[in-house]
Image: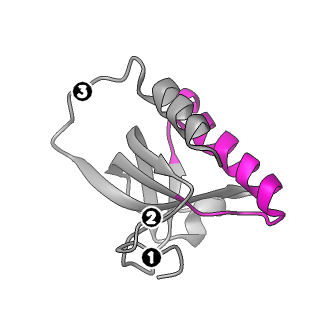
Amino acid sequence: MSRKLLVVAMAVITSGCATTIASDTAQLRGHYTWGHEVRTFRPCGSSQSFWVVGDAALIQPLQDISASLAESRGKPYPPIYVEVSAIAQGKARDGFAAGHDGVYRFTSIQGINSQSPADCPADD
């Protein structure tokens, strides 16, 4: 994915976002994965997987980047490195989310990169 596309995506994501962070909001780094019936986040250094929810305007750019990467790489479900603010919403009781360790509501996205930093490999 081109750096220009990532810059454009970040401009779209951060435009109009509030800068106030609620006290129950965590700052997280890790990998977002999107695809058919998959919307997950795995924090750096963790084997846990969390279902992701959030406002469509916030999440849609992540899905668009994931779809673009899947097409260019010829593989579904590419992990995307993200830095986000999120609120833990506990364990889901039903649906696809129930198969994960919990649910995070993404409230803002500070960074997106198709390449993972050395201290947060996609295959921890």
- Who's the residue at 58% across and 31% down the image? 56
Labels 1 & 3 near each other (Cβ < 8 A): no
- Which label sits in the foreground, 1 or 2? 1
Q: Which numbered disc, 2 or 3, marks the residue that appears first in the sequence?
A: 3
Seen at 48% across and 65% down, the residue is: 116
First in sequence: mark 1 vs mark 2: 1
- Magenta segment main secondary structure: helix
Depth check: give the residue in front, 1 or 23. 1
Q: Position of residue 64 (x, y in %)?
A: 69, 40
* Disc 1 residue crowd, few under 14, some 14–19, many 20+, Cα 10 Å: few
Q: Nearer the viewer, residue 66 or 92?
A: 66
Q: Which residue is mark 1?
A: 48
Residue 23's quadrant in the figure? top left
Q: Amino acid at mark 1?
A: Gln
Q: Is residue 39 left or right of residue 49?
A: right
**Residue farthest along the front direction in this orientation:** 3
Answer above or below: position of 3 versus 118. above
As drawn, the label of residue 19 is 3
Q: Which residues are magenta?
A: 53-80
* Residue 77 in the image: above or below residue 104: below
Residue that badge 2 annotates: 102
Q: Was residue 99 drawn as part of the magenta stretch in this picture?
A: no
> Quick one: SS at disc 2?
strand
Question: Which residue corresponds to the image point at 67% horizontal and 51% vertical from the top-left?
Answer: 66
